[in-house]
Amino acid sequence: MLPALTLGVEEEYLLIDPDTRDLVPEPSPDFMKDCKDRLGERVTPEFLKCQVEIGTPVCADIKEARHHLTALRSAIINTAEKHGMKLMAASTHPFAQWGRQKHTAAPRYDLLDADMGGAIRRMLICGMHVHAGVEDKELRIDLLNQTRYFLPHLLALSTSSPFWGGHDMQMRCSRLGIFDSMPRTGIPDRYESWSEYERMIERLVHAGVMEDSSKLWWDMRPSARFPTLEMRITDVCTRLEDALCIAAFYQSILRMLARIKQKNMRWRIYPRIMLEENRWRAQRYGCTKSMIDLGRGECLPFGSLIEEMLEIIEEGAVALGCLKEVQHARTILKRGTSACRQVEMFAKSRADGADDAEALIKVVDMLVEETAADLPDAA
């Protein structure tokens, strides 16, 4: 039996002051109240007050995920505007300073602040997480081991964090460099079985360094609450269509791997250091350069690797009803990710005579506009 591969998508957004284009360090308490009144548990505060997180319900397919993600983005945009703010989907703000932000007053966040200190206070970053339903625990671990290979490719398609604190970091994804200052991050180890994974968790809990497996902040993990595999490596996508592409791509990869397992085959497992090298290349270059084809042992243009991936997941994408969303990867490659467009906007603005501060404001304006670009209900 193939896993259900139901979908759940979580996105984190930033709240923008429309006058300064900086972050809103302390939104009105009525903003979150209005969000809750409208969306219930589909919206939650984040560690920093300038952030807000949404999560879809369990979705049978990408069509349903599209419906919910469109509605949620639209609702948060409209509610933010009601309270004099704008919404921005990007994994870092182009020029905001993390030291000026305030964390949400809640026992969970107070505990994180006390435990992590400056590492958590610097988390002025946003991500996108995708849950895929995998009911069988042993299959969950097997797919975790195999899917690690593809995590850098998904990251490269999603990058939206080239700037940090007003600086072009020469990275398409600055977010992970910041996030990796936290413990228990990165590409997970390989586990031979569900019981081996559980023993590892039990030892860490017994040692008192974490309360449960929700404190594993890997790039991909078995969910602590749901029978799902949660992909966490990607930046939040500025454009809705890009987000749906990432979710569909992830879902289709899992189906392909589950299908070959039925034939008593599997994707080759490579040492984590090799996977981490591709992760670094995705952070540094996004989709603009090359990535290692670990089977061939050589760097190849990222576009050619995506074409190969599109070929091997096509059957699954057709079966899942998400071929259009998966093939949108070609549009991302042609148009560039959000990070590519941010860097281009900054360079264009500087060439047109703007100084650095003015050019960064232009980048924020573009991001706010693109966050709502695919949302007919947000106009």
Image (tube, grey):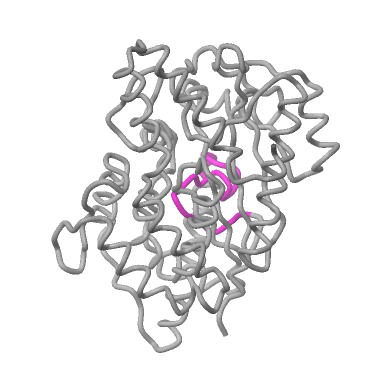
In the picture provided, is 137 more to the left or to the right than 301? right
Q: Is residue 293 magenta?
A: no
Point out the residue furthest to the front here: 352
- Residue 118's place in the image compared with 278, above or below, is above
Q: Position of residue 80 (x, y in %)?
A: 71, 27
Quadrant into which the C terminus falls:
top right
Quadrant into which the N terminus falls:
bottom right
Q: Is residue 223 magenta?
A: yes
Q: Nearer the viewer, residue 359 or 316?
A: 359
- Residue 67's place in the image compared with 158, above or below, is below
Q: Position of residue 110 (x, y in %)?
A: 65, 25
- Residue 339's place in the image compared with 138, above or below, is above
Q: Position of residue 218 (x, y in %)?
A: 45, 48
Going 21% across and 52% down the picture, which residue do you hit? 290
Going 53% across and 44% down the picture, which residue do you hit? 239
Point out the residue furthest to the right here: 37
Point out the residue furthest to the left here: 298
Q: Position of residue 266 (x, y in %)?
A: 35, 78
Q: Nearer the viewer, residue 182 or 19?
A: 19
Point out the residue furthest to the bottom here: 263
Going 58% across and 76% down the picture, which residue do you hit? 3
| Label tally | 0
Going 71% across and 36% down the picture, which residue do you hit? 76
> Image quarter for residue 356?
top left
In the picture provided, is 65 more to the left or to the right than 89? right
> Image quarter for residue 16?
top right
Question: Bounds of the magenta span?
Answer: 207-224
Q: Nearer the viewer, residue 250 or 114?
A: 250
